[in-house]
Each structure stands twice: as C-alpha cells, then as structure tokens.
Image (spheres, helix red, strand yellow):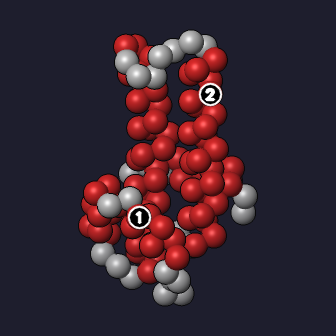
C-alpha cells in the first residue's frame, strides 16, 4: 500500500467509523494527508488566494475540511476499532492532537 492508495481509500469513506485500519494504512494515509496539505497550500499560494482571510481563506478552509479533517477523523475511528479502544476517543484526537501519534503506534488486536 502506498500513500496515494491509502488516502484515496480514506477519502472515499469520510463518515465511516466502523471497520478497522491497520498501522500501515494509517501511517500511509497520514503521509498522504501531509503531502496533500502541502499541495493545497502551494496551489492556493500560486493562484494568489490569501489563505489568511477573504474568499481564499474560505476556499482553503473548505478544502482542508473535506480533504483532510473529515477523512482523518474517520481513519482515526477505524484505527481505534483496530486496537480495541472505543471510537468516541476520536474526540481526544481533536482536543489533543498527539493522540493521533499514539493510536498510530499501538499495535492492533488482529
């Protein structure tokens, strides 16, 4: 599995919190999220949209929400299922971002 395949798999199911995600799938998807964040920021900067305010900021926020945030939260939920922790702990991922790293390190139950 490569980062692009993992990201495409995650973006196809942004509201799916059931099922599991292996450590490999999780980390490959994280790499995909980082690369995509860089690309979106670069494209917005190149076309001259100010990502700190105005219409460019709104466009950047919407892109970031639908391409990064929602898929990453559902991926974290599936990863939590894989390690046997309750899915509601995704809330901790929002409040304490280091939880994303912790759930990526803990081995799965299978």
Local secondary structure at mark 2: helix
The answer to whether one can see residue 91 in this image is yes
Residue farthest along the right direction in this orientation: 2
Q: Is residue 84 above or below residue 92?
A: below
How crowded pointer 1 is (Cα within 10 Å; few <14, some 14-19, many 20+) is rated as few
Residue at 41%, 47% (x, y): give it. Answer: 70
Residue carrying label 1: 98
The answer to whether one can see residue 17 in this image is no
Residue at 42%, 46% (x, y): give it. Answer: 69
Residue farthest along the bottom direction in this orientation: 109
Coordinates of residue 50 in the picture (x, y in percent): 47, 16
Coordinates of residue 80 in the picture (x, y in percent): 40, 72
Front residue of this view, candidates 40 and 87? 40
Residue at 39%, 67% (x, y): give it. Answer: 99
Quadrant assignment for the C terminus: bottom right
Q: Are marks 1 and 2 in contact (CB under 8 Å)?
A: no
Local secondary structure at mark 1: helix
Q: Please tell me the numbered disc located at residue 42.
A: 2
Please indicate whether residue 8 sits to the left or right of residue 82 in the image.
Answer: right
Please indicate whether residue 93 sits to the left or right of residue 63 in the image.
Answer: left
Coordinates of residue 88 in the picture (x, y in percent): 27, 67
* Mark found first going from the N terminus, 1 or 2: 2
Coordinates of residue 56 in the picture (x, y in percent): 45, 17
Q: How many marks?
A: 2
Quadrant assignment for the N terminus: bottom right
Please indicate whether residue 102 sits to the left or right of residue 35 in the image.
Answer: left
Distance from label 1 to label 2 (Cα)?
A: 26 Å
Looking at the rendering, which quadrant does residue 17 occupy? bottom left
How crowded pointer 2 is (Cα within 10 Å; few <14, some 14-19, many 20+) is rated as few
Residue at 63%, 70% (x, y): give it. Answer: 24
């Amino acid at each position: 599995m490569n980062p692009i395949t993992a990201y495409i798999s995650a973006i196809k199911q942004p509201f799916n919190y059931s099922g599991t995600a292996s450590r490999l799938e999780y980390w490959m998807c994280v790499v995909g999220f980082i690369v995509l964040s860089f690309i979106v920021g670069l494209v917005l900067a190149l076309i001259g949209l100010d990502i700190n305010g105005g219409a460019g900021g709104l466009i950047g926020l919407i892109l970031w929400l639908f391409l990064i945030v929602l898929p990453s939260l559902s991926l974290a939920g599936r990863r939590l299922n894989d390690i046997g922790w309750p899915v509601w702990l995704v809330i901790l991922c929002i409040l304490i971002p280091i939880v994303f790293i912790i759930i990526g390190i803990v081995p799965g139950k299978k």
